[in-house]
Image (cartoon, grey):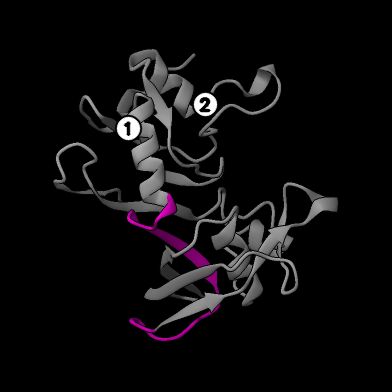
Amino acid sequence: MPALSEGLVYVDEHLVVLDKPAGLLAVPGRGEEKQDCLSARAQKLWPDALVVHRLDMATSGLFLMGRGLHMQRVLSRAFAERMVDKRYEAVVPGQLGEVGSEGDIDLPLAADWPNRPLQKVDREHGRPSTTRWRVLAVEGDTTRLALEPVTGRTHQLRVHLLAIGHPILGDALYAPPAVRDRAPRLLLHACALRFEHPATGEALAFDSAAPF
């Protein structure tokens, strides 16, 4: 199993913060060929490190683990109660506005059962879902966005941006082929985490520059 190499961002006796590369599973999948993942690699070094949240395989960026059951529960509760500030960066086709333009996407999401693992906007049965966006840069015919998922639904950022007509470049699940093929990977990166240390109450801030 490959090592973590340069993926360690922070570690202490209570938590671990890692920088996940695109294309690596965050947690094990089904089948022997899907057992290599970031959490399993971390547990080789810190056997008590437990998963607190998820990142899609195609998404890169900051990934938090709690050390021991108590810390896992405390950090999981912080995510559930929206006490963790999560920020992402993405590149999409077209223009949403000028630099500094911002808005919210409020569209309920649900599993697209016949097409699992895809998700979809479902105004009747979907769970309330909100994404905040802000334009960081306009680069030719693409827009670089800062994204804040107020809720944490599966594939939320990808489906919300698709729904407003701006699927993320390189998205093999949701983007039409012409948009998918404009990038060698999904251009979505978990670039910032802000939360209180679960043991000391210290304000923690971690940043990771988008590699695209």
Amino acid found under the numbered disc labelled 1: Met
Residue 178, above or below 186 = below
Residue 163, above or below 85 = below
Q: Give the residues drawn in magenta, as a range.
A: 80-101
Mark 2, residue position = 37
Secondary element type, mark 2: loop
Residue at horizontal 41 percent and vertical 60 percent from the top: 89
Residue at horizontal 55 percent and vertical 52 percent from the top: 186
Q: Determine crowd level at label 1: few under 14, some 14-19, many 20+ residues with C-alpha closer than 10 A.
A: many
Residue 71's label in the rendered image is: 1
Amino acid found under the numbered disc labelled 2: Cys
Residue at horizontal 31 percent and vertical 28 percent from the top: 6
Secondary element type, mark 1: helix
Magenta stretch contains residue 85 = yes
Magenta stretch contains residue 25 = no
User: Does residue 54 appear in this view?
Assistant: yes
